[in-house]
Image (spheres, rainbow, N blue to C red):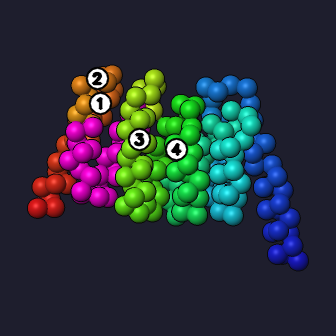
Protein backbone atom coordinates (compact mmCIF):
# COMPACT_ATOMS: atom_id res chain seq x y z
CA UNK A 1 0.00 0.00 0.00
CA UNK A 2 2.77 2.42 0.97
CA UNK A 3 4.77 1.73 -2.21
CA UNK A 4 1.64 2.26 -4.35
CA UNK A 5 1.12 5.63 -2.68
CA UNK A 6 4.78 6.52 -3.24
CA UNK A 7 4.54 5.58 -6.92
CA UNK A 8 1.38 7.69 -7.33
CA UNK A 9 3.03 10.64 -5.57
CA UNK A 10 6.07 10.42 -7.86
CA UNK A 11 3.80 10.23 -10.90
CA UNK A 12 1.95 13.38 -9.80
CA UNK A 13 5.20 15.19 -8.95
CA UNK A 14 6.77 14.24 -12.27
CA UNK A 15 3.73 15.41 -14.24
CA UNK A 16 3.56 18.73 -12.43
CA UNK A 17 7.27 19.42 -12.01
CA UNK A 18 7.82 21.41 -15.20
CA UNK A 19 4.39 23.06 -14.87
CA UNK A 20 5.73 24.69 -11.70
CA UNK A 21 8.41 26.38 -13.81
CA UNK A 22 6.11 28.17 -16.23
CA UNK A 23 5.64 31.92 -16.18
CA UNK A 24 5.97 35.06 -18.23
CA UNK A 25 8.91 36.85 -16.62
CA UNK A 26 12.39 35.69 -17.64
CA UNK A 27 13.85 37.97 -14.97
CA UNK A 28 12.25 35.86 -12.23
CA UNK A 29 13.25 32.39 -11.07
CA UNK A 30 9.61 31.72 -10.25
CA UNK A 31 9.32 28.49 -8.27
CA UNK A 32 12.76 27.12 -9.24
CA UNK A 33 13.84 26.94 -5.59
CA UNK A 34 10.71 24.96 -4.72
CA UNK A 35 11.34 22.58 -7.63
CA UNK A 36 14.98 22.15 -6.58
CA UNK A 37 13.84 21.27 -3.08
CA UNK A 38 11.34 18.73 -4.45
CA UNK A 39 14.01 17.09 -6.60
CA UNK A 40 16.44 16.92 -3.69
CA UNK A 41 13.77 15.04 -1.73
CA UNK A 42 12.87 12.84 -4.74
CA UNK A 43 16.04 12.43 -6.87
CA UNK A 44 14.15 10.21 -9.34
CA UNK A 45 12.60 13.47 -10.60
CA UNK A 46 15.98 14.80 -11.73
CA UNK A 47 15.61 13.27 -15.21
CA UNK A 48 12.36 15.21 -15.68
CA UNK A 49 14.09 18.40 -14.55
CA UNK A 50 16.94 17.82 -17.01
CA UNK A 51 14.38 17.22 -19.78
CA UNK A 52 13.13 20.73 -19.01
CA UNK A 53 16.39 22.14 -20.39
CA UNK A 54 14.99 21.34 -23.86
CA UNK A 55 11.41 22.51 -23.18
CA UNK A 56 9.75 24.56 -25.93
CA UNK A 57 9.12 27.36 -23.40
CA UNK A 58 12.21 29.53 -22.86
CA UNK A 59 11.10 30.41 -19.31
CA UNK A 60 10.80 26.72 -18.40
CA UNK A 61 14.27 26.06 -19.89
CA UNK A 62 15.81 28.87 -17.86
CA UNK A 63 14.11 27.91 -14.61
CA UNK A 64 14.85 24.20 -15.12
CA UNK A 65 18.52 25.11 -15.60
CA UNK A 66 18.46 27.18 -12.41
CA UNK A 67 16.84 24.37 -10.42
CA UNK A 68 19.15 21.71 -11.91
CA UNK A 69 22.20 23.78 -11.05
CA UNK A 70 21.01 24.18 -7.46
CA UNK A 71 20.32 20.46 -7.13
CA UNK A 72 23.69 19.54 -8.64
CA UNK A 73 25.48 21.85 -6.22
CA UNK A 74 24.32 19.54 -3.42
CA UNK A 75 24.20 16.25 -5.35
CA UNK A 76 26.56 16.52 -8.36
CA UNK A 77 26.33 12.78 -8.98
CA UNK A 78 22.79 13.28 -10.31
CA UNK A 79 24.33 14.98 -13.37
CA UNK A 80 26.51 12.00 -14.29
CA UNK A 81 23.96 10.00 -16.36
CA UNK A 82 23.29 13.13 -18.45
CA UNK A 83 26.91 13.99 -19.25
CA UNK A 84 26.69 13.56 -23.04
CA UNK A 85 23.44 15.51 -23.30
CA UNK A 86 24.73 18.34 -21.12
CA UNK A 87 27.98 18.64 -23.08
CA UNK A 88 25.93 18.76 -26.27
CA UNK A 89 23.70 21.48 -24.82
CA UNK A 90 26.77 23.37 -23.59
CA UNK A 91 27.80 23.57 -27.25
CA UNK A 92 24.35 24.48 -28.62
CA UNK A 93 22.78 26.77 -26.02
CA UNK A 94 22.34 30.38 -27.06
CA UNK A 95 20.20 31.79 -24.24
CA UNK A 96 22.32 33.49 -21.61
CA UNK A 97 20.32 32.11 -18.69
CA UNK A 98 20.85 28.57 -19.92
CA UNK A 99 24.52 29.18 -20.71
CA UNK A 100 25.49 30.48 -17.27
CA UNK A 101 23.83 27.56 -15.49
CA UNK A 102 25.43 25.05 -17.86
CA UNK A 103 28.80 26.68 -17.21
CA UNK A 104 28.27 26.15 -13.48
CA UNK A 105 27.33 22.49 -13.96
CA UNK A 106 30.03 21.49 -16.46
CA UNK A 107 32.88 21.12 -13.90
CA UNK A 108 30.64 18.83 -11.81
CA UNK A 109 30.54 16.25 -14.60
CA UNK A 110 32.91 13.24 -14.51
CA UNK A 111 34.82 14.23 -17.64
CA UNK A 112 37.41 12.22 -19.51
CA UNK A 113 40.48 14.09 -20.72
CA UNK A 114 38.93 14.49 -24.18
CA UNK A 115 35.64 15.72 -22.72
CA UNK A 116 37.47 18.13 -20.42
CA UNK A 117 39.32 19.62 -23.38
CA UNK A 118 36.02 19.98 -25.24
CA UNK A 119 34.46 21.70 -22.22
CA UNK A 120 37.41 24.09 -22.02
CA UNK A 121 37.00 24.93 -25.70
CA UNK A 122 33.26 25.52 -25.31
CA UNK A 123 33.73 27.63 -22.19
CA UNK A 124 36.38 29.63 -24.01
CA UNK A 125 33.63 30.54 -26.51
CA UNK A 126 31.43 31.54 -23.57
CA UNK A 127 34.06 34.17 -22.72
CA UNK A 128 32.94 35.94 -25.93
CA UNK A 129 29.25 36.03 -24.89
CA UNK A 130 27.44 39.38 -24.70
CA UNK A 131 26.46 38.65 -21.09
CA UNK A 132 29.02 39.45 -18.43
CA UNK A 133 27.27 36.91 -16.17
CA UNK A 134 27.91 34.15 -18.73
CA UNK A 135 31.52 35.28 -19.04
CA UNK A 136 32.02 35.35 -15.27
CA UNK A 137 30.57 31.87 -14.78
CA UNK A 138 32.66 30.60 -17.70
CA UNK A 139 35.75 31.98 -15.95
CA UNK A 140 34.79 30.17 -12.75
CA UNK A 141 34.13 26.93 -14.64
CA UNK A 142 37.49 27.13 -16.39
CA UNK A 143 39.24 27.64 -13.06
CA UNK A 144 37.34 24.67 -11.59
CA UNK A 145 38.43 22.50 -14.53
CA UNK A 146 42.03 23.67 -14.08
CA UNK A 147 41.87 22.69 -10.41
CA UNK A 148 40.80 19.20 -11.49
CA UNK A 149 43.50 18.89 -14.17
CA UNK A 150 46.88 20.56 -13.49
CA UNK A 151 47.90 20.11 -17.14
CA UNK A 152 45.22 22.63 -18.11
CA UNK A 153 46.38 25.33 -15.69
CA UNK A 154 48.82 27.21 -17.96
CA UNK A 155 46.25 27.52 -20.77
CA UNK A 156 43.46 28.50 -18.41
CA UNK A 157 45.61 31.04 -16.57
CA UNK A 158 46.25 32.65 -19.96
CA UNK A 159 42.52 32.61 -20.82
CA UNK A 160 41.64 34.18 -17.46
CA UNK A 161 44.29 36.87 -17.84
CA UNK A 162 42.91 37.73 -21.29
CA UNK A 163 39.34 37.82 -19.98
CA UNK A 164 40.46 40.17 -17.23
CA UNK A 165 42.15 42.56 -19.68
CA UNK A 166 38.96 42.95 -21.73
CA UNK A 167 36.33 42.31 -19.07
CA UNK A 168 33.98 44.23 -16.88
CA UNK A 169 35.01 45.26 -13.35
CA UNK A 170 33.18 42.18 -11.99
CA UNK A 171 35.10 39.94 -14.39
CA UNK A 172 38.41 41.54 -13.40
CA UNK A 173 37.62 41.05 -9.71
CA UNK A 174 36.60 37.41 -10.23
CA UNK A 175 39.66 36.85 -12.42
CA UNK A 176 42.02 38.15 -9.72
CA UNK A 177 40.43 35.82 -7.17
CA UNK A 178 40.53 32.80 -9.50
CA UNK A 179 44.14 33.41 -10.56
CA UNK A 180 45.19 33.74 -6.91
CA UNK A 181 43.50 30.41 -6.15
CA UNK A 182 45.12 28.69 -9.13
CA UNK A 183 48.55 30.01 -8.18
CA UNK A 184 48.04 28.87 -4.58
CA UNK A 185 47.11 25.38 -5.82
CA UNK A 186 50.21 25.36 -8.05
CA UNK A 187 52.41 26.14 -5.06
CA UNK A 188 50.73 23.45 -2.96
CA UNK A 189 51.20 20.89 -5.76
CA UNK A 190 54.94 21.46 -5.89
Disc 2/disc 3 C-alpha distance (Å): 16 Å
Residue nearest the viewer, comparing 92 with 19: 92
Q: Which residue shows up at 57% across the image and 45% down it? A: 89
Q: Earlier in the sequence, mark 3 or mark 4?
A: 4
Side of 85 relative to 151 (left or right): right
Q: Is residue 152 magenta?
A: yes
Disc 3/disc 4 C-alpha distance (Å): 8 Å
* Disc 3: which residue: 123
* Disc 2: which residue: 166
Q: Which residue shows up at 37% across the image and 61% down it? A: 113
Q: Earlier in the sequence, mark 2 or mark 3?
A: 3
| Dominant SS in magenta | helix
Residue 33 makes an appearance in the image: no
Q: Is residue 147 magenta?
A: yes
What is the number of the mark on residue 163? 1
Bin the neighbour count of mark 3 within 10 Å (Cα to Cα): few under 14, some 14-19, many 20 and up. many
- Residue 166 is drawn in which quadrant? top left
Which span is picked out in magenta?
135-159
Amino acid sequence: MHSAYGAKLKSVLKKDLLALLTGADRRSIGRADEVASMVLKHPALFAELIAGLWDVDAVVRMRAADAAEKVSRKQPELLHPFKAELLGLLAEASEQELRWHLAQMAPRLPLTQTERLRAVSLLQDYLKDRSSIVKTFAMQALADLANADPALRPEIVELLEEAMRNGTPAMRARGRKLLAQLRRVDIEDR
